[in-house]
Amino acid sequence: MLTQWFWFVPAAALLALVFAWFFFKQMMRSSEGTERMATIAAHVRRGAMAYLKQQYKVVTLVFIALTLFFAFLAYGMHVQNPWVPFAFLTGGFFSGLAGFFGMKTATYASARAANAARNSLNQGLRIAFRSGAVMGLVVVGLALLDISIWFWVLNAVYPAAENTHNLIIITTTMLTFGMGASTQALFARVGGGIYTKAADVGADLVGKVEAGIPEDDPRNPATIADNVGDNVGDVAGMGADLYESYAGSILATAALGAAAFLAHDVVMQFKAVIAPMLIGAIGTVLSILGIYVVRTKEGASQKELMAALNRGVNLSSLLIIVLSAGVIHLLGLPNPWGIWFSIVVGLLTGIVIGKSTEYYTSSSFKPTRLIAENAKTGAATVIISGLGMGMLSTAIPVMSIVIGTMLAFLSATGFDVANLNQNMGMGLYGIGIAAVGMLSTLGITLATDAYGPIADNAGGNAEMSGLGPEVRKRTDALDSLGNTTAATGKGFAIGSAALTALALLASYVEELRIGLDRIGVTQLVFDAQTAVDVKTASLVDFMAYYNVTLMNPKVLMGVFIGSMMAFLFCGLTMNAVGRAAGHMVDEVRRQFREIKGILEGKAEPDYARCVAISTKGAQRAMMVPSLLAIIAPIATGIVFGVPGVMGLLVGCLASGFVLAVFMANSGGAWDNAKKYIEEGNLGGKGSDAHKAAVTGDTVGDPFKDTSGPSLNILIKLMTMVSIVMAGLTVTYCMM
Amino acid sequence: MLTQWFWFVPAAALLALVFAWFFFKQMMRSSEGTERMATIAAHVRRGAMAYLKQQYKVVTLVFIALTLFFAFLAYGMHVQNPWVPFAFLTGGFFSGLAGFFGMKTATYASARAANAARNSLNQGLRIAFRSGAVMGLVVVGLALLDISIWFWVLNAVYPAAENTHNLIIITTTMLTFGMGASTQALFARVGGGIYTKAADVGADLVGKVEAGIPEDDPRNPATIADNVGDNVGDVAGMGADLYESYAGSILATAALGAAAFLAHDVVMQFKAVIAPMLIGAIGTVLSILGIYVVRTKEGASQKELMAALNRGVNLSSLLIIVLSAGVIHLLGLPNPWGIWFSIVVGLLTGIVIGKSTEYYTSSSFKPTRLIAENAKTGAATVIISGLGMGMLSTAIPVMSIVIGTMLAFLSATGFDVANLNQNMGMGLYGIGIAAVGMLSTLGITLATDAYGPIADNAGGNAEMSGLGPEVRKRTDALDSLGNTTAATGKGFAIGSAALTALALLASYVEELRIGLDRIGVTQLVFDAQTAVDVKTASLVDFMAYYNVTLMNPKVLMGVFIGSMMAFLFCGLTMNAVGRAAGHMVDEVRRQFREIKGILEGKAEPDYARCVAISTKGAQRAMMVPSLLAIIAPIATGIVFGVPGVMGLLVGCLASGFVLAVFMANSGGAWDNAKKYIEEGNLGGKGSDAHKAAVTGDTVGDPFKDTSGPSLNILIKLMTMVSIVMAGLTVTYCMM
């Protein structure tokens, strides 16, 4: 039963966790530097941990409530698999754990990275990058471990070898843990995102713009909150987010594999299910290899550092292309080169989206320079051109997804264009495995992504400890180095979200099959003459039965609601940032006014109050948007049934994807346009153009770090909720 | 054959045109005031006419090219009805004519309204409102006339009495003239929108913010361009836009009526086709009645004026509810009360959207006040909260459309929820007729909408002629009075766009039927056993045959592209405004710098150069987005076929609708937040909060007057193009 292959997955997971532990210990051995540096780091660490504690307290209550609800559905109403509540809980727990470990590492690493940067750029990179690697490996390690354990447990309960339906039950039940992870991730992204941007906007508006003191200046009362925010938003939030993306893509593809090979023998089905897990496992080993390759000689230039990072990522990516071909051939899946090409397409799509992100957001290229140029005519034109450019920048990513999806789909079907309907299962499996390919080397790509905020915090620590400009310059160099890799990382995150969500639509239909089966519906009856067995009905049969066509008004209304959900969600989070930032501005202004000697550096600001404002703002505001994501698909299902839910998911995906790209790119471009001016262009720091650009950057903050990245999770969470709730929908629907 | 009923339509059209002529003559008899007033009005009029001439020159070339293309499709490739090129041309011509007449009236009215306002508020209202009425009546009159002529001609060629297929051909061919109108309207909205906002932003940024001179000050070189812009954007653009909406809703519903009653006898089908035309005709007569009711005693307060406007609109709306019940019963349509209720639902939906627009954009309510509050912490927080609020404000309109559409659909089917598939034709007819109901009294609602820009221009004239603050105050009062009615008007425009576009999806399928018939496909073959005649196949059959389900990747890719199109389009237009405004700023700064004595009022600024900059910016930038709207559906059809096109339309509709509401409401709220501060709140004029609010208003300019309103047209134009090109799609599709 090929179980020997499967064991490679938990083995790779443990390997990743061991290396993460090892890198963590290695980092902890280095010095935190001066006493002041250690004190500041401790301040930030305590603030971050306090926030996370508060956050997890609230989220735990939400999880308890939802778990009870699922338990009621499973045990009281019998519309759900009995394992669902437990799978949901573990998904949330592990996702939170990934964020917790990542943040713990980051908060210990910042002073150490700053201290290492006192010696050289290279040593700073080493500490920061290895700490980022801890996060990368923890995320993939925990995800693969969780997947392995659940697969093992459920396989014992519903033996895959018995019949092809058991793997359907196993894989769709496991999606519930993806839902748990998504729920946790959404809270982490939204809460952390509001926290960090309220602090950032507040600190910048009064500190930089009004008082004219530099970023991270200890005289600014919001500066500790700002640095705490980097950790809870950019580190813990991102960790939970990518745990969710990574696990989600593997789980979705496993479920699609089970469905696509429903008519085959159980062995082939089993292979299709473990293929994405194996690719993830191999990618993890390759990531560790890649991390070791990232090293340069002492005194390396920034360009050489970049080359070192690229070497690591490229090596892992190239090897995964080669080795995944081997895995698929060894497994003996049908049309192996076709499936392999889907993986390659996935990787390429990610790279194209990443490059396009870089083009639209880096100040080395025309778009961001144009936005900077517009700063000369004031804040309004900076905003208009940033919004316009962000909207334009959606074209390449959307077209990449369109072309990538079609290629991945067609390739997995052997380019059998004439029989799309018959090959739909295989095609969707191709889309799923493309997403897995995109994220397979997450261990290292996340390392190159996560070290950015660590370097940023190291810079903050250096500034507040008064280490002098040369250290700050080095940490800034590291930070800006991370921007490019982060752009690619974002491309992979959003690209995989789109592909995963598309593929998950098929899992929704599979769950309908299980739901109907559970309530005793054995046939899809079309008319007196025609009926199809629920157990063997095709995706096309289900579409016809539920009339999920674009002429069904329920589908169309679902699409409208879905599209609106994306905007509503962003509106809620944007307003939350605006409101909390407003309070922060008032508080910082009050402290500047009331605490004598604060601006001369003679009196200590009241950092704690600013931390409290951010915390309160975030905790209060994260509930509504997050719960909305859970309630909307359930309510739509009850009112508009299956067609409404599928419309909702497609509407939210299409609108949300484009909106996410727009917001991320506008935000990134404003940020870099400001930095471009700060480098001395167009009048440089302190000029009117600079002030206008700072306004742009401030508007961009919630765009790129709160609302934009949360959309990825929103899209998938709504899909997962729909899948888990499919049983409820088919049992109780009004129309 | 009930033709006696039909003649009521051209009669109402001519009546509307006669009254329009009468109101125009009446207005022309009043005095233009001082010589300076007449001179300035002549300046603006010449500028506006010069722009329109240039605009029509360019658009004519586009129309010639497109007409030749359609002629080739019709006569060369035989994939299209031979009348298509002519219908297309007339639609464009009449839409342009409506804009031309509206603008001509507005440019003659501005000085006269200003002069009347010297006497009293009431006299100012009379002139401005009656001039607005000219535009309202011209739009509905020309639309009904055009519809009548084409119906008459095509009925002579394909006699409706012969068989039920002729009316299908007639009504779908007539949709082509809707496409012509949409094409013209898109150019008018985009070109006019870019023109007006480039001038407005440029004038405000340098004049108001930098030089600190008031709006419409003659020392500002961009002021004439700004006033010209109000005419070409808000008047000519809006005229072409609403001509398109009005004609589109009637034509779509006629086509749906022909399709829904395909299986009935020809008489019933004929009645269903003329029902929307008759409702439009009655609404037109009622509009004229309503216009006459709008009169107040001398010395009326602003509240009384508002009441007078409302009286006119409410009377027309109430009477149309009563009389449409009569029409439907007299025609003897089946389920008359159900169809009538659809009309009522349409009207109510429009009102709810309008009220929600008012709530989110009027400074009497919390949202706009909150945005104004945020001005205290600077431009960035104004922008963030405006964007956030705009996104939130999409919820009510979307839910109104969702509920309204479902109710209109179900009501027309007699709430036969169990047989949605069988009743789909009737349900869609219900959606279409709801849109017709919404727009039936356009004659008067447009009058209350169009008089706003006339009052605005009157204010400009008063300012530039130095008439003193009391006149300006009166024109401002008229202008702000118009804001509320304009909010409702916008609700009707966008609501009807959504309903029309939804209903037009069915027309697309009807056109497929004709296209297949034309290339000799007589049966939809499902498999060896099952086939359905093309001529009698139901909508559901077509959906099944082309697999237009949400699991078809072609559909999903279409949805993605459609969603992206809305953003791309806005990005292009936003950037165009930003670019042209930048040039305007540079030019105004240059004139302030180089022309000595300009700010002391001793030297005349070079108005013409600013006019030229706006014209060039608009003409250059309108081509790409407009042509994109025509090319995208054709290209998608060729690559992804019917499923791709339908996905594209739904994606663009869902995303575009939400985006349009978001942009219109953010823009409106920023505008009024600024005005709220200017009224003396939160520090009043000249305070830092005011400066921040001006930045918000400037960003909002292209939101609410360029990109946002163009989206309505984009959505419908893409749908119309798809319908007209359906023959091409079924004949030549790659996949």
Image (cartoon, coloured by chain):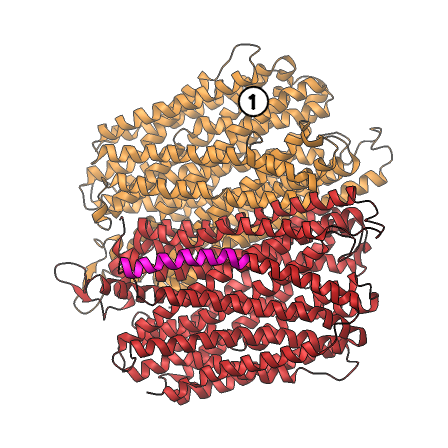
Chain colours: A orange, B red
Q: Could you say where residue B89 lies in the image, as x and y percent from the top left?
A: 42, 65
- Residue at image coords 35%, 45%: A503
Closest to the observer, B17 or A412: B17
Left or right, residue A277 beside residue B439: left
Assign the magenta stretch its main secondary structure. helix
Q: Could you say where residue A172 lies in the image, as x and y percent from the top left?
A: 33, 46
Left or right, residue B680 beside residue B559: right
Closest to the observer, B457 or A518: B457
Tell me the kind of residue under disc 1: Ala
Residue A389 appears anywhere in the view = yes
Q: Which contiguous range is marked in magenta?
A: B55-77
Left or right, residue A693 beside residue A656: right
- Residue at image coords 49%, 80%: B13
| Quadrant of the image containing the N terminus of chain A | top left
Q: Could you say where residue A344 lies in the image, as x and y percent from the top left?
A: 33, 32
Q: Badge 1 sits on which subunit? A: A
Left or right, residue B21 beside residue B592: left
- Residue at image coords 41%, 89%: B330
Residue A636 appears anywhere in the view = no
Mark 1 secondary-structure assignment:
helix
